[in-house]
């Protein structure tokens, strides 16, 4: 068999019975979360606590990308399917580490700025000879598994005037491909759509938040949700939010599928829904009928979201004993910092406990409502919510090991404070505020004053029954990789500072590590080929935090590493990262620094970081440029060359005098932090 023939026959097997409900013994990794329950727990135990020290590289594969890589590699019968940035798909022969094919959907690079959080993609879905990818520009594309040829392609977006993007992995439940989208930082209405896996015909669509109440509601769930929004805020103009940008799971026995919904659009509830209200179905877990898309139940984790607290973080379906009784539950650790155990048959709240320091709520009452701290919503001055908007846990997948009963969770804190933008109006172009259609459209100022809390990154082993940490490992930085756990009593995690590490799943003892050349954000997978167990991880620093910051002194292209016991391949040569010399000599008017601060924070900081303080992620830090570059900043800001890589064109958004003020801020900030 040629590799292409193997690819074709392998993926043909991936059908209703091939993807398991949960953690069954399977030699493959056929779906992004391994199984429908998204456990990321493999029963393979060839690699275990006894021999993990002998893990070595078998091959590495250059993904030829320089931006964030967030995909979990799928593997069936020795054929790997993985995505890089810009939604590029690679099919790799695991036996040789060689490319079988690659497919670039040719996303228009100049539209990069339309997403909040880097041009990332979290992986593909496989089904009956096809590979599905959600392209950044909103297309759902079905490829022939053997050749990478396009079989069909659907535009999933309802409105191209709005900043919808796709970053999440599609799932296939019962012969339907499911995909949502991102965009709630810009003003969109969230929804999820199901397409026939063979033909691409649309089967159903469910909106997560109500539309314009002057028009008929799509279904009873929308009519009910509308009662929880204040129409005087005209929430439908900004879209309302609630995007389904990452997690989905499926319970074949209950015939229910589950999605997590995102934050409000805009973030500030005082603007979105001035008289308050829970604003259903934001920041919720929602159960849907996979055949029809009909709403079944919901549990809202953050009523009336005001902090970008989303519930799109990866969820896991598990069967556990709670106070002596077996319960079918959902395990979930959303951005808001609480670990939830929810009954997945009916959405009933079982328990919630904070897994990091939180200051917006003291806990949850017996009915499952948060007990809020009033000050958390008082945003007339910069308020530092814990967790911040990057979440106590973001999209980085967690895993659940039924042997240890523990969930392995990449927890974090990224300090950011928020202040209401009282004058905010949807789509009004005021570059001084963070809603110039290039900056986020949140109705809030981010870090109008410097935040004071400390950044934190931690691998947390959480006991969901006792609702407490069993063990934890402190990392040097936030934004560490997703986790994998195995029957070999292991937990694997890549780190922001560029290591791949194996821990004892019971104790947290570090058993093995290897450098990865660049920070890791994605989660590993494991599988058997010809009877031998491998572990693979796709590496590529990036995402919303990684685009502007770094925690490693090395860099390299997006790369897949594949490890096995006794592997002897040589790591590729890592390139040392040099931030360069601090910017010097740009003449500026000190009186303009203050105006420049607001402009920079509104328009530049999310991608370029703080000049001379952050050292550049995969987007350059402007505090380390040559003076000639900053002196000619207007040539980059107005229809500049970086547009071809996704930078916005600020024509009509910023004036020449705004650019002068931004230059003053950049050089002024660097001068202030330059070591004396
Ligand atoms: O509200 C949204 O629609 C939306 C979408 C996305 C995305 O699609 O990547 C992210 C977020 N929000 C978000 O809040 C967030 O922290 C985030 C991090 C990342 C990432 O890939 O690093 N994406 C997103
Ligand atoms: Ca968001």
Image: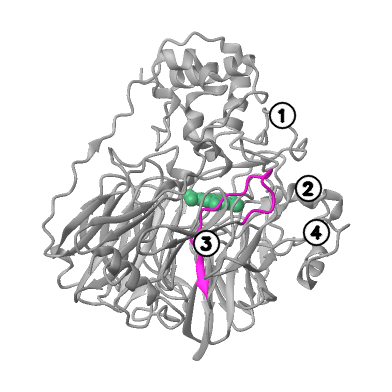
Q: Compute the Cα span from label 4 to label 2.
A: 13 Å
Residue drawn where x is 53% and y is 10% of the image: 588
* SS at mark 2 in the image: helix
Disc 4 residue crowd, few under 14, some 14–19, many 20+, Cα 10 Å? many
Q: Of residues 619 and 173, which is closer to you in this image? A: 173
SS under mark 4: loop
In this figure, which colouring scheme has been used for the structure?
one colour
Main SS of the magenta part reads loop
Whether residue 168 is in magenta: the answer is yes
Residue drawn at the location 78% of the way across and 47% of the way down = 237
Kindly tell me whether mark 3's CB lies below 8 Å from ligand 1: no
Any mark on residue 237, and which? 2
Q: Residues within 10 Å of mark 1 (few under 14, many from 20)?
A: some
The residue where tag 3 is placed is 313
Distance between the alpha carbons at the discs numbered 1 and 3: 32 Å
User: Of label 2 and label 1, which has the lower sequence position?
Assistant: 2
Mark whose residue sits in front, 4 or 2: 2
């Amino acid at each position: 068999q040629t590799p292409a023939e193997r690819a074709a026959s392998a993926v043909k097997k991936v059908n209703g019975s091939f993807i398991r409900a949960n953690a069954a013994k399977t030699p493959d990794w056929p779906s992004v979360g391994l199984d429908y329950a998204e456990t990321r727990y493999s029963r393979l135990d060839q690699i275990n606590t006894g021999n993990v020290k002998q893990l070595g590289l078998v091959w590495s594969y250059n993904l030829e990308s320089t931006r964030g890589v967030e995909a979990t590699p799928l593997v069936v019968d020795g054929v790997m399917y993985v995505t890089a940035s810009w939604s590029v798909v690679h099919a790799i022969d695991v036996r040789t580490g060689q490319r079988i094919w690659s497919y670039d959907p040719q996303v228009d690079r100049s539209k990069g700025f339309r997403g909040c959080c880097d041009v990332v993609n979290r992986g593909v879905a496989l089904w009956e000879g096809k590979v599905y990818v959600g392209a950044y520009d909103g297309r759902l594309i079905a490829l022939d598994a053997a050749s990478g040829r396009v079989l069909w392609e659907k535009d999933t977006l309802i409105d191209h005037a709005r900043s919808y993007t796709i970053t999440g992995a599609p799932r296939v439940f019962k012969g339907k491909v499911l995909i949502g989208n991102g965009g709630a930082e810009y003003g969109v209405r969230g929804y999820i759509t199901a397409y026939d896996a063979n033909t691409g015909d649309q089967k159903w669509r469910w909106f997560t938040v109500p539309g314009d109440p002057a028009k008929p509601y799509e279904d009873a769930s929308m009519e009910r949700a509308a009662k929880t929004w204040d129409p005087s805020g005209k929430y439908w103009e900004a879209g309302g939010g609630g995007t389904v940008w990452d997690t989905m799971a499926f319970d074949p026995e209950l015939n229910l599928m589950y999605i997590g919904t995102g934050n409000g659009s805009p973030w500030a509830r005082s603007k979105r829904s001035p008289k308050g209200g829970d604003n259903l179905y934001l920041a919720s877990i929602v159960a849907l009928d996979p055949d029809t898309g009909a709403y079944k139940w919901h549990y809202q984790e953050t009523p009336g979201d005001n902090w970008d607290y989303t519930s799109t973080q990866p969820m896991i379906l598990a069967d556990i004993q709670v106070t002596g009784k077996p319960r079918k539950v959902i395990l979930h650790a959303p951005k808001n910092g609480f670990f939830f155990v929810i009954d997945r048959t009916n959405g009933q709240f079982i328990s919630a406990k904070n897994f990091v320091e939180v200051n917006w709520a003291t806990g949850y009452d017996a009915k499952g409502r948060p007990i809020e701290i009033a000050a958390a919503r008082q945003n007339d001055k910069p308020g530092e919510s814990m967790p911040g908007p990057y979440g106590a846990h973001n999209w980085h997948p967690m895993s659940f090991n039924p042997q240890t009963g523990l969930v392995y969770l990449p927890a974090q804190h990224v300090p950011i404070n928020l202040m209401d933008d009282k004058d905010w109006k949807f789509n009004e172009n005021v570059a001084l505020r963070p809603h110039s259609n290039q900056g986020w459209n949140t109705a809030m100022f981010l870090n109008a004053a410097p935040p004071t809390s400390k950044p934190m990154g931690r691998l947390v082993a959480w006991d969901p029954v006792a609702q407490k940490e069993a063990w934890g490992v402190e990392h040097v930085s936030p934004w560490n990789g997703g986790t994998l756990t195995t029957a070999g009593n292991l937990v694997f995690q890549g780190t922001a500072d560029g290591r791949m590490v194996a821990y004892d799943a019971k104790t947290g003892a570090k058993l093995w590590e290897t450098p990865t050349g660049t920070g890791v954000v994605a989660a590993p997978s494991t599988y058997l080929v010809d009877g031998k167990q491998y572990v693979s991880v796709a590496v590529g620093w990036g995402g919303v935090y990684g685009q502007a910051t770094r925690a490693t002194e090395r860099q390299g292209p997006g790369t897949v590493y594949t490890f096995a016991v006794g592997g002897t391949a040589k790591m590729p040569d890592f390139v040392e990262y040099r931030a360069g010399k601090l910017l010097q000599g740009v003449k500026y008017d000190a009186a303009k620094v203050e105006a420049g601060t607001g402009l920079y924070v509104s328009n530049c900081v999310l991608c370029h970081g703080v000049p001379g303080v952050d050292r550049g992620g995969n987007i350059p830090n402007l505090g380390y440029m040559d003076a000639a570059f900053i002196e000619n900043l207007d040539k980059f800001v107005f229809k500049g060359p970086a547009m071809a890589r996704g930078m916005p064109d600020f024509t009509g958004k910023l004036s020449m005098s705004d650019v002068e003020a931004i230059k003053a801020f950049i050089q002024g900030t660097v001068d202030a932090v330059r070591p004396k």
